[in-house]
Image: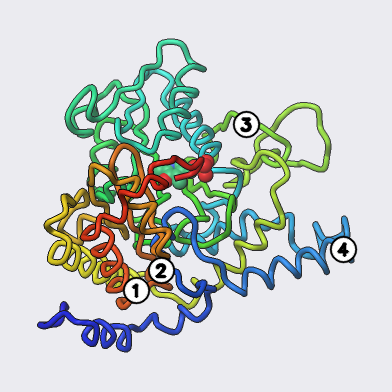
Amino acid sequence: MMPATLDLAAVEAMDAADPLRAIRDRFILPEGVIYLDGNSLGAAAPAVFDELRKAATQEWAQDLIRAWNTAGWFDMPVALGDQLGRLIGAAAGQTVVCDTTSINIYKVLHAALGMRPDRSVIVAEGDSFPTDLYMAEGVASTRPGTVLRLEGVDAPTIEELIDERVAVILVNHVNYKSGQLRDMAALTCKAHQVGALIVWDLCHTAGALPVELDSANADFAIGCTYKYLNGGPGAPAFIYAAERHHDKVQQPLSGWWGHARPFAFEQGYAAGSGIRRFLCGTQPVLSMRALKGALDIWDDVDMATVRKKSIALTDLFIQLVETRCGAYGLELESPRDGNQRGSQVSFLHPNGYQVMRALIERGVIGDFRAPSTIRFGFTPLYVGYADVWQAVEVLEDILRTGAWQDARFAVKTAVT
Ligand SMILES: *Cc1c(COP(=O)(O)O)cnc(C)c1O
């Protein structure tokens, strides 16, 4: 509920009443920074450093090769997968942490295509995060005659592209740019009605809002752990595969870690049982350990509480921006209805890049997505209502004074 008068005191009262307030203290938030980019790289937590230190100084340094057994390194991809599974509505044994999101898209998309050998269409979204489409192109190139049909290019909506020719649909639960949320259960059902499989990209979902893969009857899902889950830069990604597919599915990157008996050193490939068959090679143990520290924080967090706060934060931001910055050419790109939105808010501005650079210089860190989106992520675990207030104060000042017009903000950096 939004308070009747919106001032700093009202916003501070919202923080005081926030059931997630104590969780914020488990993160490191630099002085003078308001961090609204947890949807690109989540904040660091001391618990993550503890795990990293243990993995490096005890397990690696002292236990050496023995640690694969004694420290549970070998089972970490599935153990972490189960821990993460709770946050995405996946019962144990169906989620594995490994590789990158891009690689995992390749594995599951190729696997799904292989399960529909008499069908030739992959459906995706024209405004998808580009790597999803690049990987889909790569998968399509492995089977002659496969075509990629895109929402926004080949038809206005994804639903119109779904028919009996479709082998697999690759779709984002939350659009990375606009934050638009899709109805997972409904679209999954529509896919299944025509015998197609569906792969859900949860990069902007996992840790941002609750999702129920099992009850939606999803086939596959993939996603990041370095965004809302706070696993650290380049933290390994994840794959979900519904148990009903495990025996049939063949993934193309048939490395020894997905083998039924990796340490038998047999000559031919034999896929392992269960979700392990989605593994390829040796996994980054230090990064996995860091992720363990980050996921442990989530063990004390209820996703429904996260969702409630996420909607309140983003509603507050939209309301404040529109009342205070309305005169400066910003246009809301995200859905206005909180139930249609992930945990981010995007505005369009013709000079969005410069505006974002000016914000970052003033300590308000969001990001820019070409051609003109300024994007703000609200991580309910560590962003408070007063942060939202302060961010809008700075944004208003930059727009009112025209501070963003300084020439140095027009020079592009490598990563935006
Ligand atoms: C962040 C993101 C990725 C990132 O893929 P990497 O392989 O980790 O670089 C992929 N897809 C979507 C939708 C994303 O938001």
Q: Earlier in the sequence, mark 4 or mark 3?
A: 4
Q: Which mark is residue 34?
A: 2
Confirm or reject: label 1 Cβ below 8 Å from ligand 1. Answer: no
Which residue was labeled with disc 1?
A: 387
Q: Quadrant of the N terminus?
A: bottom left
Q: Are marks 4 and 2 in contact (CB under 8 Å)?
A: no
Q: Amino acid at mark 3?
A: Leu
Helix, strand or loop under label 1:
helix
**Residue at x 52% of width, y 74% of height:** 27
Quadrant in the picture for residue 137: top left
The residue located at (37%, 35%) in the rendering is: 170
State yes or no: Cβ of the residue under disc 3 lies below 8 Å from any atom of ligand 1: no
Q: Are marks 2 and 1 in contact (CB under 8 Å)?
A: yes
Instruction: Say whether residue 374 is left or right of residue 33.
Output: left
Taking the image as shown, residue 169 lies to the left or right of residue 8, namely right
- In the rendered image, the vertical position of residue 258 relative to residue 76, given as above or below: above
Towards the viewer: 94 or 289: 289
